[in-house]
Image (cartoon, grey):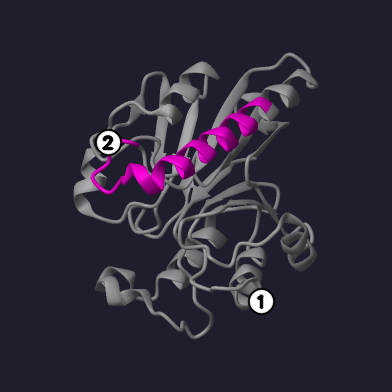
Amino acid sequence: MKVFAIGDLHLSGTPPAKPMDIFGPHWANHWNRIKEDWNANVSDEDIVFLVGDMSWALRLDEAAHDLREIASMRGRKYMIRGNHDYWWASANKMKQLMSDAITFIQGHGTAEIIDTAEGPQIIAFGGTRGYLCPGDSHFVPDTDQSIYSRELMRTESALQEMDAAIQQLPDLPITKILLIHYPPFNDSNEPSGFTELMARYDVDICIFGHLHDQISFKRIPKEFGTTKLELVSADYMGFTLQCIL
């Protein structure tokens, strides 16, 4: 069994109402390219983390086509919200639409035992959207501080639920994975409330997306403290899924 991740699919129906190649020719036919890689590498029992910005839709009913496209792909799919996922609705409404085809996560966490090439281990995962961090060039304290603080609370709630779930499982090697859409620090890679939580809760891997420019691609480090960082924006990944475990 393997664990994969990808973010920023930016779907908009078939044919796409908002073709992504308006942002550059490298986006041409991007969903078909992602699907080709997905079908070639992911099995039904694998886990796929989807870290936000899945659909350009504004309402849940408008996003249904895109969500069903994603749901039709192999693997057990866990999705968090991105800053462009305006269609995101209540947990009950999303579950009613998708049943168990996609599990939507916002401020929650869980843990389970998986079989890997190295043997059985516990994988604990959870998260939320995240947000711009103080000191970022786009952070406006008057409007952004309250949202940032709320997302920190949701992140800690997810990490606490992960730890509680781990306590219910046998003593096995553990990998803790935090899922957020935004990077866990500002655009100068400075410490933040998110990086403090990652350290305090011994997060092994932080998976995120959101970034789409070469300057950002080059500035993201491979780790922050003892946490491995995995940037999985679709364009950064060359429209392939990243194998995490």
Q: Which residue is under mark 1?
A: 61
Q: Main secondary structure of the magenta part?
A: helix
Image point 33% across, 70% down: which residue? Answer: 27
Q: Nearer the viewer, residue 42 or 135?
A: 135
Q: Which tag, 2 or 1, sits closer to the chain's start?
A: 1
Most distant residue in the front direction: 142
Tag shown at residue 33? none
Above or below residue 40? Residue 183 is: above
x, y percent for residue 96:
79, 64
Q: CA distance from mark 2 to mark 1?
A: 37 Å
x, y percent for residue 146:
47, 41
The quadrant of the picture occupied by the N terminus is top right
User: What stretch of residues is rendered in magenta?
Assistant: 134-160
| Location of residue 238 by image quarter | bottom left
Image point 49% across, 36% down: which residue? Answer: 149
Above or below residue 1? Residue 118 is: above
Image point 46% across, 54% down: which residue? Answer: 7
Q: Which residue is under mark 2?
A: 135
Determine the secondary structure under disc 2: loop
Is 230 magenta? The answer is: no
Is 140 magenta? The answer is: yes
Q: Nearer the viewer, residue 244 or 160?
A: 160
